[in-house]
Image (cartoon, rainbow, N blue to C red):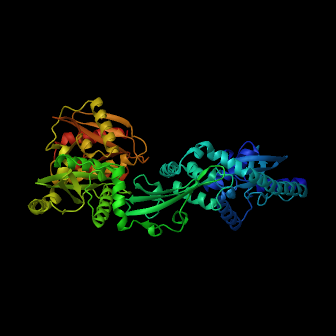
Amino acid sequence: MKFVIAVVLAAAWAMPEAHAASATPAKAAVGFLEKIREGNIDLEPGKGTAITANISPGKREEIDRWLKRIAKDISNGELNAGEVKIDQDLAAVLVSDSDGYDPARWRVYGIALMKHGGEWLPAPVPASFENTGSSYQSDLRQRMESLETWMLDGQVTWMEALRDQAGEKMRQHFALSISPDELRKMSATQVQQRFTQACIDKNLDLMLALLGGLQKTPPADWNLLVRRARDTTSAKLKDTDPWRLLSSPEVLRIPMTQNLGTHQASLVTAYLDPSNPNIWLLTLKLSQDSDGLWRVDLPKALLDSENDAYEAIQELELDSYPEFQSRLREQIPLQPSADFNSAVSAFHAGLEKKDLTGLLANIHLNDDPERTKRTCAKLARDWRGAHPLDSFVIPVKLATHEAGSRGVAAYQFFSTTSPTKSDIRLFYFSNTSDGWMLESEETSAGVDGEDFDEIHRWVGDSQRKWHNEWVSTLLANATPIEAIQPGQPPTKEDAEKLVREWITKTQATDVSGALQLAATFTDPRGAAKSVQNLSFEIKAHGNSEKTPQILQTKVGKTWAAVSVESTNGEEQKPVYAVINTKLGPRLMLEVDLFTGGSRGREFLNRTSLERLKKFAPPEVVDELGNLLQQFDQ
């Protein structure tokens, strides 16, 4: 009879994959929970668990749903194996999931395991030997039930012990980011500044330490604080999320009023967010407990997880704009320019900065609150136009014109999303008693008159030209090529140096610098294709976390062809075609070639080479095609 049972058990267990199990019960248990968390559990028999081969599809689907529910409760923290109990070929392991931030989320899991072929395999459902097909022998069933009871009792006992230790463990964890002594010595203003910087840096430990994590008694809404702070640091915030005011590095923050008490403080700050270009007010309250530890108390608008709009945030009232303007100038002093060209240069530098401070240092603000409000909003929108959240935009100066005390600069906002789209923007300047400054509007009191009329006429006469010719203006730094003559190829060293410089410039979105390394054909089609390829290069290299490396270089009689790593991990690799010009080696921007291609890519390669025949003899084109084929051999 025992022989029959043994045969049944052997059939019930499919042979597992050797790599799926671990040498010890503890490692196997932790690995099982990690796979549940990752959604990487395979419930097919023999695929890493002790699930029976006789299980029905419906039961397997039920277990899969159950494991997915468990996965939602497992934190991203470290899983630690605790007590282990082994009974011959059966084992039970207790595993703790003690999230360092929120004791309410701490869990203790029991994992049942069975030894098969020298490997420990977890049962498919935590704390149970069910669905393993091993309950045919009464003595085996009794051993399993004994281990299941041990796991249930152990979960309760260990969980109670963890909760007793939770407060001290959490405080020790947060003290690594800021010590209690340091926090006691800080002023309320310093705490606010430190908290804001922690939000910008997405330093969750420091954020929670300053939200009360170091205090012996955490705030009553601690679970909510942890959840909202974690959401802020772990995901990209929506444009409409008011947490941007504290956490976005591009938001301008101007301290307004401070009510400072002995153990309490209320600090009001004005915020200008380019994604929501109004002046917003937010009050942070701070308090000290009996142990002298400061705590930041967040306003309700930041705690409401359902609120993803600025509706709950107060907007700066018009009668407060004079005070705002005064405090703005304390933080960002006015820096007028001595002449119009210098003012345009300062504006361009400010437009390229990663925040609004550069533009605000050059903007003319007068005493009209309505105008100041419009000025700040327009400035924020202009900056956002140059720094969109979902693409790269490079402001390209097209032309400037000065008339007396007035001036205007015309810009094309070159977007990698729509590289051939015209997006002309005008920026006006005036010469005031302080010097040349940026104006938010076309007109300004005292300097309009004939000077403005002249500016207006010039803009009207030039706009059609800008829309038609901005591409050629953008490509002005590139070397124009009318025809490619055979002979005199670049050296391998020169070609590779050029490509490395090209990658560096495009990674930095330095359009002018990149184009100085490139050559373009002079016809309109070539210009449009060059702009499109430039856009692709900026997107590919600007979004890449690492610098693509050169793979191979082939040198012919006219060309040097350089293959480079793909930025997205695909098999296809870009190949840059480099030629010699009177100005030195240049990268042919319009020539669009890739190695390791599919049929579609091969067709595009042929199309690019066919287009090249308009500017080069057939043998020169064939040479480049042959160099390309050598990369795939």
Q: In the depicted view, which residue is nearer to us: 14 or 33?
A: 33
Residue 183 at x, y percent in the picture: 58, 46
Can residue 235 be seen in the rendering of this structure?
A: no
Q: Is residue 567 left or right of residue 261?
A: left
Quarter of the image holding residue 445? Answer: bottom left
* Residue sitting at x 20%, y 46%: 342
Q: Is residue 558 left or right of residue 603?
A: left
Residue 100 at x, y percent in the picture: 65, 50
Q: Is residue 157 left or right of residue 65?
A: right
- Up the image or down, 626 lies above or below 127; here it is above
Q: In the depicted view, which residue is nearer to us: 470 or 445?
A: 445
Residue 337 at x, y percent in the picture: 21, 47
* Residue sitting at x 68%, y 45%: 18
Q: Is residue 453 left or right of residue 390?
A: left
Give the residue furthest to the front: 262
Image quarter where the N terminus lies is: bottom right
Image quarter where the C terminus lies is: top left
Residue 402 at x, y percent in the picture: 12, 53
Q: In the depicted view, which residue is nearer to us: 433 or 552?
A: 433
* Residue sitting at x 22%, y 40%: 516
Query: How many numbered dots are placed on residues in this image?
Result: 0
Can residue 171 be seen in the rendering of this structure?
A: yes
